[in-house]
């Protein structure tokens, strides 16, 4: 098992197992410095994301996520980096709302998810406009086509 993790030390992708391995911290270890382009996520900044979406005339992709959520880590490691998914996500203001922390932001995020979407499951994704109108929602999925179809949803005219 240890040998199977060795490529990860040098920055290689580990596939499915990445959901169980802590994310590397920038500048630590022997990880490659030529990492793929990262998506610009706002963390626990729901109102700021809505304001930015209004300024940039974009939709918001809300990612209700968790620090200890294995499925959330899987999505970050295996779904978001896919070229077609990453390209589609660049069209949104991206905001991660952590719901499993012990801080007040996590409590507020969980309350928002429960009240607005009647669920506390993780991960949970919502496409919204800047006025908080929900366009589409999606729970956990490992199907790239399903996630891409979700990302291509737009408001009805």
Image (cartoon, grey):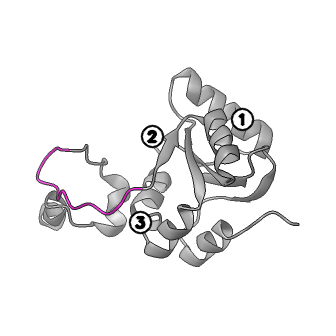
Q: Quadrant of residue 109?
A: top right
Is residue 99 something that shows in the picture?
yes
Q: Nearer the viewer, residue 21 or 132?
A: 132
Q: Which residue is mark 2?
A: 67
Disc ID at residue 77? none
* Residue 16 location (% of width, % of height): 36, 67
Label 3 environment density (alpha carbons within 10 Å; few <14, some 14–19, many ≥20): some
Camera-near label (1 vs 3) is 3
Where disc 2 sits, the SS reads loop
Crowd tier of the residue under label 2, counting other residues whose Cα lies within 10 Å: few below 14, some 14–19, many 20 or above: few
Provide residue 76's location: percent of width, then percent of height.
44, 57
Q: Disc 1 vs disc 2: Cβ atoms closer than 8 Å? A: no
Q: What residue is shown at x 19% (from left), y 61% (from top)? A: 11
- Which residues are the magenta region? 27-38
Look at discs 3 and 2 and give the one toward the viewer.
Answer: 3
In this rendering, position of residue 153 left or right of residue 95: right
Q: Residue furthest right?
A: 157
Residue where numbered disc 1 is placed? 112
- Mark 1 secondary-structure assignment: helix
- Seen from the viewer's position, the closer of residues 69 and 63 is 63
User: Does residue 1 appear anywhere in the picture?
Assistant: no
Decide: is 108 above or below 127. above
Q: CA distance from mark 1 to mark 2?
A: 17 Å
Q: Earlier in the sequence, mark 1 or mark 2?
A: 2
Residue 81 - label: 3
């Amino acid at each position: 098992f240890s040998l199977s993790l060795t490529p990860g030390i040098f920055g290689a992708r580990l596939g499915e197992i990445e959901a169980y391995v802590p994310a590397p911290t920038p500048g630590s270890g022997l990880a490659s410095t030529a990492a793929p382009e990262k998506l610009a996520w706002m963390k626990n900044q729901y109102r700021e994301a809505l304001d930015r979406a209004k300024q940039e005339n974009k939709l918001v992709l809300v990612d209700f996520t968790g620090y200890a959520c294995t499925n959330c880590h899987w999505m970050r490691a295996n779904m978001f980096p896919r070229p077609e998914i990453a390209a589609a996500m660049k069209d949104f203001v991206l905001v991660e709302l952590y719901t499993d922390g012990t801080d007040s932001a996590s409590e507020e995020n969980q309350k928002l998810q429960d009240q607005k979407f009647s669920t506390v499951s993780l991960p949970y994704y919502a496409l919204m406009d800047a006025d908080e109108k929900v366009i589409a929602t999606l729970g956990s999925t490992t199907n790239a086509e399903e996630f891409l179809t979700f990302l291509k949803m737009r408001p009805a005219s």
